[in-house]
Image (cartoon, rainbow, N blue to C red):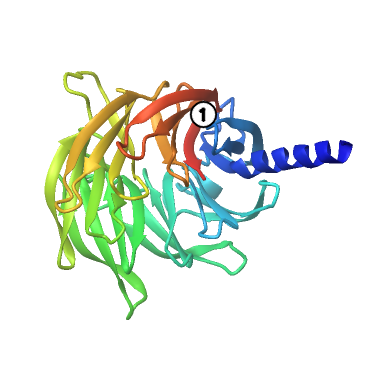
Amino acid sequence: MKFLIFIFSFCCFSIVFAQNIPMYVGTYTDTDSEGIYRYDFNLKTGELTNKKLAVKAVNPSFITFSTDKKFMYSVGEIDDFEGAKSGFLNAYSVSKDGTLTFINKVSSNGAHPCHIQLNSDNSKVAVSNYTGGTVSIHSVLKNGGISQAVQVINHNKGAQQSHTHSAQFFKNNLFIADLGLSSFSQYQWNNTDNKYQLKVNYEVENNTGPRHFEISQKGKFIYVINELNSTISVLKKKKESYAFIQNISTLADGFDGKSFCADIHLSKGGQFLYVSNRGENSIVVFKLNKTSGELKKLQTTSTSGDWPRNFTLTPNGNYLLVANQRSKNISVFGVDKKTGNLTFLHSVDSPTPACLLF
């Protein structure tokens, strides 16, 4: 009998353990936060538990994984790295217990880095420096570390201040959203000099402030979220470049307060698009027309917190989690995969969350 009870208990424990996956939280290190945190997320119940400090770090406001999740990379969003007007990048190896082990640190070649992303084969990393107005491109070393910059793309030209906010690799292209210049740029890899060269600079409406963007799976459409006027710009591929086909508001009809877009993500199947608004403090759901690429607003729901900076969908697509920076909590929503709509489940306190990563 005791043996059967042991087997039953072991099986129950194994099931619960299998339902838990790690989620990491990048933060701003104010009085409440010390760096990057790790939680257990239950894929069955949507519960976040077992918060632990994964590693101490300074302002790791944006974090990302290598494809195999053996390495993690973070920005250090400061402006005085080693006496220069710059921030930095950190490389970590991910231990089996979920803790992070420091590998190395390099300059981001610009102040206040706010976004970092790897290319598809994990050989390059691009970091966007908001105050610096540059995008710094680095090689990834064999041990998972980061090299010094192999190229620095400088958007500062003339009197207008560049604020590069995000960059993404797609095939042999590098796309950059520049909030300061209100531009969205497409760079292409040049095999002759082994650098990215500007191909097209898409000028968005004046003072819209492109911040983040999502590229559809085959690159047919690009969805750019504009921070300053709370809109999404939709671009459709035409031969080897793109053309604007739609601009749509992210705010609810009748909202007249101040609000600033923050983050944007496609659902796994590419049927729905989610965006966050800081000020309105909302998550908005859009349905995609897969033929035209145009968007239709379906739902606006409160984030149950203040200043939703970043959000993420779980790998199975059943949940959406929001990092509410000012109220210092993470809200968990259930996702209806058929309609795309969200249902608030609960929230947990979290020290100044800025970026969520599964």
Q: Where's residue 132, x and y in %?
A: 37, 47
User: In the displayed structure, does residue 280 sit left or right of residue 73?
Assistant: left
Residue type at mark 1: give it.
Thr
User: In the displayed structure, does residue 148 sit left or right of residue 241?
Assistant: right
Would you say residue 206 is visible in this rendering?
Answer: no
**Relative height, residue 289 to residue 217 (above, below):** above
Q: Where's residue 65, x and y in %?
A: 52, 53
Q: Which residue is mark 1?
A: 352
**Relative height, residue 141 to residue 252 (above, below):** below
In the rendered image, the residue lying farthest to the right is: 2
**Relative height, residue 36 to residue 188 (above, below):** above
Q: Where's residue 358, x and y in %?
A: 52, 45
**Relative height, residue 18 to residue 140 (above, below):** above
> Which of 81 and 112 lies nearest the eye of the viewer?
112
In the rendered image, the residue lying farthest to the bottom is: 192
How packed mark 1 is, by other alpha carbons closer than 10 Å (few <14, some 14-19, many 20 or more), is: many
- Residue at horizontal 33%, vertical 60%? 153
> Which of 84 and 148 lies nearest the eye of the viewer?
148
> Which of 214 and 257 lies nearest the eye of the viewer?
214
- Residue at horizontal 14%, vertical 51%? 292
Element class at badge 1: loop
Task: Determine the image quadrant of residue 233.
Answer: top left
User: In the displayed structure, does residue 116 sit left or right of residue 241?
Assistant: right
Task: Determine the image quadrant of residue 237.
Answer: bottom left
